[in-house]
Image: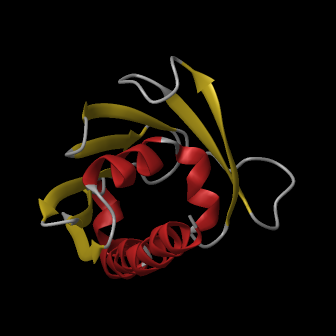
Amino acid sequence: MAFAEYEVVVQRDAMSVYNFLLDPRNLVSWRDGISGVELISGAAGSMGAVYRPFFAGTAQPAVADFELTATRPGAEIQFQVIAGPARPHGGYYLSTEGGSTRVRFALRYRPPGAGVLMYPKVRRAMKAQVAQLERLKAVLEHQRAAA
């Protein structure tokens, strides 16, 4: 199984961070290569909602739909990629530290059968994705400074 995680401390309260992360349309502001996200089924921000990301440089959405599988206000958001060649499970885990919030972004992926041969490449890609949490921190702290 491939696993990657990264964490940062954001100078924002947990509910502000949670609400920002709960809206996948905000991925555009901090995740490389994502040019848009649309809700394709379910109620926005609730368990079972399914979203389709659009990737920069492509006219059509890539097959990488994901579903919100667990939400705990101010504490946790989990999702599962439900379409595409790789279907990792991921989550954002929040904890309050004074007036700040520790955010951990974790991804895990169990490649099917022969997919084990791709393990090193998948692990590197996952590590790069979770490290983008640094950009989330910068975006949220800039919003706070601008307010």
Residue in the foreground of this view, choosing between 39 and 13: 13
Residue 11 as seen in the image, left or right of residue 41: left
Residue in the foreground of this view, choosing between 144 and 17: 144
Which residue sits at x=40%, y=22%?
48
Question: How many numbered circles are shown?
Answer: 0
Quadrant where the C terminus sits is: bottom right
Q: Quadrant of residue 68?
A: top left
Residue 107: horizontal and vertical position, in percent? Answer: 28, 61
Residue in the foreground of this view, choosing between 101 and 92: 101
Q: Quadrant of residue 120?
A: bottom left
Quadrant where the N terminus sits is: bottom left
Residue 109 as seen in the image, left or right of residue 97: right
Q: Quadrant of residue 102?
A: bottom left
Which residue sits at x=51%, y=29%?
50
Which residue sits at x=36%, y=55%?
17
Residue 89: horizontal and vertical position, in percent? Answer: 30, 49
Q: Residue furthest front?
A: 147
Q: Residue furthest right?
A: 59
Residue 28 as seen in the image, left or right of residue 142: right
Residue 142: horizontal and vertical position, in percent? Answer: 53, 75
Residue 106: horizontal and vertical position, in percent? Answer: 25, 62
Q: Is residue 133 above or below residue 12?
A: below
